[in-house]
Image (cartoon, rainbow, N blue to C red):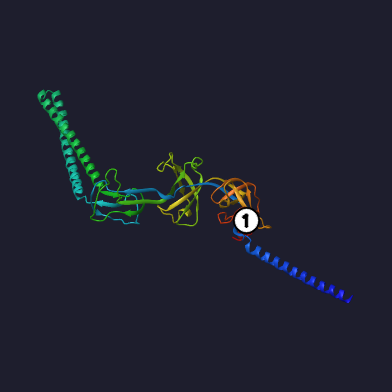
Amino acid sequence: MRVFTFNIQIKKTRMNKYIVRFFWGAVILAAAGSLFWYATRTKPVVVTLYTVERGRVEKTVSNTRVGTVKACRRSMVAPAIGGEVSRLPVKEGDRVERGQVLLELWNEDLKAQLKLAEAEKVAAEARVEEACHIADGAERELKRVRRLLKNNLISEEEVDRAKTEFEATEAACTGASAQSKVSDSRIAVTQAALDRTIIKAPFAGVVAEVNAELGEYVTPSPPGIPTLPAIDLIDASCLYITAPIDEVDAPPINTGMHACVRLDAFPKRRCNGTVRRIAPYVLDIEKQARTVEVEVELTDAEDLQGLLPGYSADIEIFLDVKEDVIRIPTEAVLEGYRVYQYDNKTDYLSERQFEPGIANWNYTEVLSGLNVGDKIVLSVGREGVQAGARAQPETTSGPGTSQ
């Protein structure tokens, strides 16, 4: 009996050892499995989130290629004839008044001819005075002899001689007067030739460029061959931006529409512009990119501050504006008006479609499909961002959050 009991105890001891070993083996296997799962599980993709909010959305059109700031008046003046520069009283950057001399060619010969023509005019006027005085005397003589003829004191022959003398002197007076007018015309011709050697400012402005030197011989541009102007004069008191708009975007644009201007040289956009002109034709220089030239004028003194002709600029014309509507950044919108929405509870991304309203490069209006407070992915182009992916927020943007 004791031997039998002893054997049973031995068997129980062995069974307990097997159970303990099995338990610890299972624990080790579970730990190893957990470690393997943790090591091989998919890592979450880091995303930038945006919290859907309400705000202003603008429907705009922009230029397809860079525009240019231009002056309302700009004159690239050059002499009408060739000649040697004898006077150059201005330099680049000078402010000039209307009618001020900018450049003068050597013209001493024309000045001498003008003096000669003026002297001839004086002589012609003296001849007119002399001839007309003689004609007046002949007229008085004719009247006197006619009175004498009535009293039969002289003959008809003497009256005829007096009449002939008067007519001759009267013709001499008329001829002298005509010669005086010829002198006037000669002065005008010489003065015109002289004026062609002098360049004067057609308006008040700033000298932007001078392409001449004292003593240098300058010539006008040959027909069809553009050359540098002698003087480039700009009136910077009035500026506008001209830029090409794609032919597809041009039809809704009207003069008087509000517009903003962005310049590479300045960070802040200038939003007091007005569409002042829309070209009545389509430019087809590039067959695959046909455009309509649109001009936007800036009249606000603050917008004009620091602006210079020649700056590159982009225009943004407002077709429609809506206030206090649900909006999302346009960069978050996928093809087919879809977005990736982030679930705070599961950390997973899902695809969400919405109905859009008006839009621009910055924001798109949401008519339905999204609500204020929803979190959507901004970094849609980042590798691994797709529906069903586990995500880890990097930053969020929106009301009450940090950027």
Residue 252 x %, y %: 51, 41
Q: Which residue is drawn at 38% across and 48% down?
A: 73
Q: Which amino acid does label 1 sit on?
A: Ala
Q: Residue at x 11, y 27 (%)?
A: 161
Q: In this view, does 153 lie to the left or right of 258?
A: left
Horizontal side of residue 52 vs 180, given as left or right = right
User: Which residue occupies the foreground of this view, 260 or 345?
Assistant: 345
Q: Which quarter of the figure is the N terminus placed in?
A: bottom right
Residue at the disc numbered 1: 389
The answer to which quarter of the image holds residue 122 is top left
Q: Is mark 1 on a helix, strand or loop?
A: loop
Q: Is residue 70 above or below residue 397?
A: above
Nearer to the camera, 360 or 391 = 391
Label 1 Cα neighbours within 10 Å, binned few <14 / some 14-19 / many ≥20: some
Q: Looking at the image, is 339 positioned above or below residue 128?
A: below
Closest to the observer, 128 or 209: 209
- Identified at 18% across, 33% down, the residue is 174
Give x and y (percent) for residue 246: 47, 43
- Does the rendering let one see residue 111? yes
Is residue 155 at least partly visible in the picture? no
